[in-house]
Amino acid sequence: MELIDGKKIAAEITQEVADNILNKTLKVGLAVILIGNDPASHLYVKLKKKACEKVGINFHLYRFPDDTDTNEIIEAIEFLNIDDEVNAILVQLPLPKELDTKKIIASIDPKKDVDGFHPDNIQKYINGDTNWLPGLNEGINILLASTKQELIDKEICILANSDEFAEPLEKYFLKQNIKASHVHLKDNNWIDKVKQADVLIVAVGKPLLITDENIKDDAIIIDVGTNRLPGDTIVGDVDFDSVADKCSYITPVPGGVGPMTIAMLLKNATKLAQ
């Protein structure tokens, strides 16, 4: 088993972004909307702020309590849509259950949608009208490419809760003539699908869900999950210790997909500024 070092790759991308901003004297403004008190979300936002400050991106944080309603959030987004100092908007997910996540994401100006989750942007990608991939998805592609493994003859399974995440990623692989499908935990056959995968991408928010019994020999595993256990231990959706002797490559948690997600956020915010 070999580790896919997301931290190292992310550091290289972050340096490229910093050099790009400095050399082109770019003014990049990122607005982040944070709702509620979810500890993981607060941690992610803190890390994003630190990364922005490191490369020279102006970071604007807008915090709202748990009981904020959907319309209040949309009003804030509509203000940011016309704010000349902000060229990238991010809504930190997941949102409190009472809020309409799809409606909130759809209220972002597609030209400022740094995550690439706006329905228009997703549809454009699925239709082949743009090469813009959500940052998380592009980060995963870079991590897979770092293994230097040929994927054409492999079967990719994306186990995810979010279609906004899974569909553009699935489409990306299919465009390259790579077999890819996505499946939800609510699907009765999800275990069978996962067991057949040469490449398994997991993003369900269930700590240590995937064990050696659920994976194929020599599978490549991309663990998107970040879960906090009692005692502040951070683990993925995959039981690393269980699968280590069976898989060929795996992203660690922490140190895998997380740093790449932040690096791609910086890169995409800079693209929008340009």
Image (cartoon, rainbow, N blue to C red):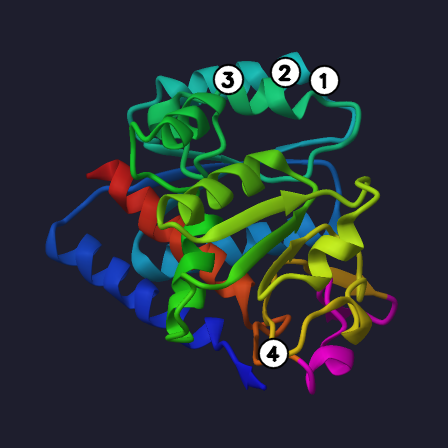
Q: Is residue 76 above or below residue 134?
A: above
- Circle 4 crowding by C-alpha within 10 Å: few under 14, some 14–19, many from 20: some
Residue 69's tag is 1
Give residue 221's position: percent from left, percent from top: 60, 68
Give residue 102's position: percent from left, percent from top: 61, 22
Drawn side of residue 22 relative to residue 6, left or right: left
Task: Report the Cα–Cα distance between label 3 and label 1.
Answer: 14 Å
Instruction: Give the label, 4 or 2, closer to the camera.
Output: 4
Q: Are marks 4 and 2 in contact (CB under 8 Å)?
A: no
Residue 238 lies in the magenta-colored region? yes
Q: Secondary structure at mark 2?
A: helix
Callout 4 amino acid: Asp
* Mark toward the start of the polypeptide (3 vs 4): 3
Q: Which residues are magenta?
A: 230-246
The residue located at (59%, 86%) in the rendering is: 1
Quarter of the image with the C terminus is: top left
Q: Which residue is mark 4?
A: 218
Callout 1 amino acid: Asp
Task: Report the Cα–Cα distance between label 1 and label 4.
Answer: 47 Å
Callout 3 amino acid: Ser
Residue 261 in sight from this viewpoint: yes
The residue located at (70%, 58%) in the rendering is: 194
* Mark toward the start of the polypeptide (4 vs 2): 2
Q: Which residue is mark 3?
A: 107
- Circle 3 crowding by C-alpha within 10 Å: few under 14, some 14–19, many from 20: some
Q: Which residue is mark 2?
A: 72
